[in-house]
Amino acid sequence: MSQITARILDELLALLDQAAAELRRTRAEVIRQAVEYYLEDYEDLASSIAVLKDPSDAVLEWGEVRERLLA
């Protein structure tokens, strides 16, 4: 396991301490979990953007989609 150092705003530190206290976790545990969640979301977002940028993917018109769904 590696160690990193980061600077954060005092207000953010206060929120971190509050969350850690409520969760009965250390700052480090809350930060690790937050980074994991962030990276999971980032992977999902990156995949979604790749799909949207795929030129072979058909573009659908909203009116046509709506008609098909309501039919």
Image (tube, rainbow, N blue to C red):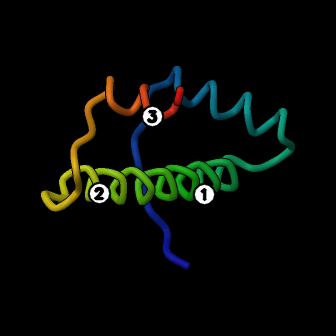
Q: CA distance from mark 2 to mark 3?
A: 23 Å
| Amino acid at circle 1 | Arg
Q: Which tag is nearer the camera, tag 1 or tag 2?
A: 2
Query: What element does badge 2 sit on?
Result: helix
Q: Find out whether the residues at labels 3 and 1 contact each other: C-beta distance under 8 Å.
A: no
In depth, the one of 55 and 44 nearer the eye is 55
- Image coordinates of residue 29 in percent, x first then y, are 69, 55
Figure quadrant of residue 14: top right
Local packing at callout 1 (Cα closer than 10 Å; few below 14, some 14-19, many 20+) is: few
Q: Nearer the viewer, residue 64 or 36?
A: 64
Q: Where residue 70 appears, x then y in whole percent?
A: 53, 26
Q: Residues within 10 Å of mark 2 (few under 14, many from 20)?
A: few
Instruction: State the separation of the CA atoms marked 1 and 2.
Output: 29 Å
What residue do we see at 50% from left, 50% from top? Answer: 38
Q: Would you call the spot at circle 3 few (<14 residues within 10 Å), some (14-19), or many (20 or more)?
A: few
Viewer-side label of 2, 3: 3
Query: At label 2, which amino acid type do we have?
Result: Val
Q: Residue at x 67, y 48 (%)?
A: 30
**What number is the disc on residue 51?**
2
Nearest the eye: 3 or 19: 19
- The residue carrying mark 3 is 68
In the picture, the disc for residue 32 is 1
Q: In the rendered structure, which amino acid carries the disc numbered 3?
A: Arg
